[in-house]
Structure formats: C-alpha cells, structure tokens
Image: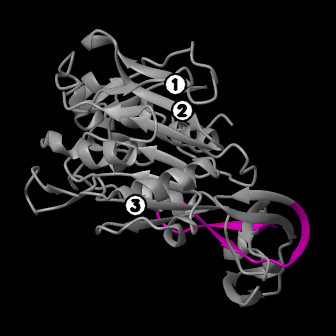
Amino acid sequence: MRSCNVFSVPFVAMAMVTSYLWLAACTPSSTGVVGTQTQTTRTVSAGGGVGGTSTVVIGGIAVTASQGQGGDTGGSASSGSTQVSCDDAGNCGPCLAILSLGQPGAYGSASGDNGNTNEFQTYMNTNTNGKMTMMTTFTSLTDALLGQYNIIILQALEDRTPSSQSNSVWTFQQSDIDALEKWVKAGGAIIAMSGYGLNSDEVKPTNQLLSFSGISYGTGDTFTTCPDNLCQCCNGSIPFSSWQSSYTDNPAITHDLKEVGIYSGRPLSCTGSDCQVWATDPSTGGADVGVAQVVGQGRILAWGDEWVTYTSQWGLTATPYDNATNYPQCVGRTAQSVYNVPQFWNNVFKWVAPTATCFTITQPSTPGQQIVF
C-alpha cells in the first residue's frame, strides 16, 4: 500500500474533541509495510476555495470537506500535515487501520454515563490519522480479515448479556491462532486488555489467541481496593504510576507518563528472554500488569486493565469532582488534573507500530492531558 501526507484542517466537532477533514492530492514517494501489505508514501496538499463544500477523489474515494473562506475547513484554524495509506491502485485510507475485537468496557464508572467508552473510540477516529473499527460479534480470524488491519486491540472476547458481568466467552480454533501468529510475525501488532468483568473466564479466549507468544493473563484480581478513600475523585479508579525503567525499550512505552486509572484488573505473565515488563502492581508483591514482546516482525503489548478506555478517565472535560467548592478533597486528584491517558495511548501505539511514522495523535487542549511526543 501507499501512504499520503495529508494537510488536515481542524474544526470543532464536539465539546470534547477536535475532528479533522482531509482534502488531498497525492504523488508517490517512499515505501513501508503494513501487516502483509506493501505501502508507499504519497504527498497530499490542502486545497481551497471560498465557502461551501469541496470534494476531491483520491483513488476512487470521494472526500468531502466543508470550507470557510480561503479554503480553511470551518474557516478558523491553520493547516497541518499528516499521512494516510493508499494501495497501489490509489485507494487511500487511514495511516493505521485498527480493529477493536470484542466488547468494549461497560462496567467502569463514568460521570452520569456508566461504562461509557465513547471517548476512546471517538478520540481514535477523530484525533488521530488512524481509523478504528469496532467488531463486537464473534468472527473467525482469517488471512483476508487480518490483512485489512495493522493493529488489533483485544477487548472482552465474549457475548455480553445486559446487566451481567458473567458473560459467555468466545472459543477460538487452532486455525484462528495460526492465522493470528502468521499475521503478527509478518508485522502485525496486538494490544490486549483484560479486567472487563467479574468472570475470570474472560482471560481464556485472550490467552488462546496469545498462546503462540510468551504472554498470558492470570485469573486473579489486581487493584480492588482504593488505598485512600479518594478514588471517587477519579470517578472510581485507582491512580496508577508504577512504571518500570529496566525494560529493554525503556522509555518508549512509559515516557512522560504520570498516572492513569486502573481498577479490578488481571495479572500478567511473560516468558522468554525477549519479554519486557513495563508496569507492576506494588500492592500485590510486584505482579506484572504491563508487558510487551517482539514476535517476529510484529509486536504484542498487554495491559492488565481496561479503564484507560473509559470516557471518565480521559479528563478532556470537567466532572463534578473538579468543582473545588463542592469537592475540596478532590483538588489535584481528579482525572483531568492527574491522569494523562492520551499520553498512554500515544506511547502504546508508537511502540507497537514503530515503522508507521505517518501515525500522529492530535495534541489535546485540556491542561493535564498534554502529550509529549
């Protein structure tokens, strides 16, 4: 495939996020690899006109953008530069194609909207030049399916029953595992999470799919008790900052990380000389909660929790606990003031896809949530 430098013009899509519209024209340049597909880079430049909309066809795909005066989308902000991917026929898409496999988190606290992970999904699709597809029903893993993506995020691999945390977990076949192993060794990347519910069987399908690696989840619980009775300030999560510095690729995964929220997760184990432990749980004798491994040309990164996907943890908007008058005990303790979840995801994606130099994450404007690239 080929990738394109896109000059994108930001406009305010919602109160919490900035969205990007692409207006592009491409010319070929360098090569790279995405999964098992070949890529080349193309340069894309912004076009303009006066008010209204403009449509440009890129490799048969029509891209339409609303424009203000002088060609600025929304008529307000200046242009930037990023990249998208195009195949040899000129069909362009996102720089990173990401598949979220399984059910998203649903049981974490989120001010007035329990278990909402919309911010994670929205952020990936509007504040990056990647594209995340949600697949929440069981699907066999084939070469054809996997070849469409650069990164797969393993979430809760189960059929979800409303109002239940004990759901029916998926069962994969050896053919699924073989296809995934082949895809990873050819350059694909996996990001795995766990701790989605009370049923410890949730780790079984994830461990199945990771069985070709040295990474697996345990059935025990981690981070189940708030240490200081102030976890309500972060909407119910426990602040975590026990990042390690002795792993091989330090500080790639943990650089400039302060704290993220975690609650009722699962421990991890990783075997093999190429295992990298980048986060541990100091309250349970040092159980590993963040590990990574290079497998062939691909990479696998596992995190022992799912709270980094909840909207309440991103801190991009104030919650009631940010009101110092009503909650003086929460001053300096809220997700908005102490967590930097966008930094977490920036580091994770940059580590699992190190050759995707086109991938960018838009800098959040919220204080305390800035990204250090």
Residue shown at 83%/86% (left/top)?
A: 49
Label 1: which residue?
275
Label 2: which residue?
293
Q: Are marks 2 and 1 in contact (CB under 8 Å)?
A: yes
Disc 2 from disc 1: Cα separation: 5 Å
Q: Label 1 sits on what residue type?
A: Cys
Q: Report x, y in % for residue 285.
A: 28, 9
> As displayed, is residue 63 above or below residue 108?
below
Q: Are marks 3 and 2 in contact (CB under 8 Å)?
A: no
Residue shown at 41%/33% (left/top)?
A: 215
Disc 1 from disc 3: Cα separation: 25 Å
Number of residues whose C-alpha sits closer than 10 Å to that of mark 2, classed few (under 14), some (14–19) or many (20 or more): many
Number of residues whose C-alpha sits closer than 10 Å to that of mark 1, classed few (under 14), some (14–19) or many (20 or more): many
In the image, 359 versus 33, the foreground residue is: 33
Q: Which residues are magenta?
A: 2-30
Label 3: which residue?
175
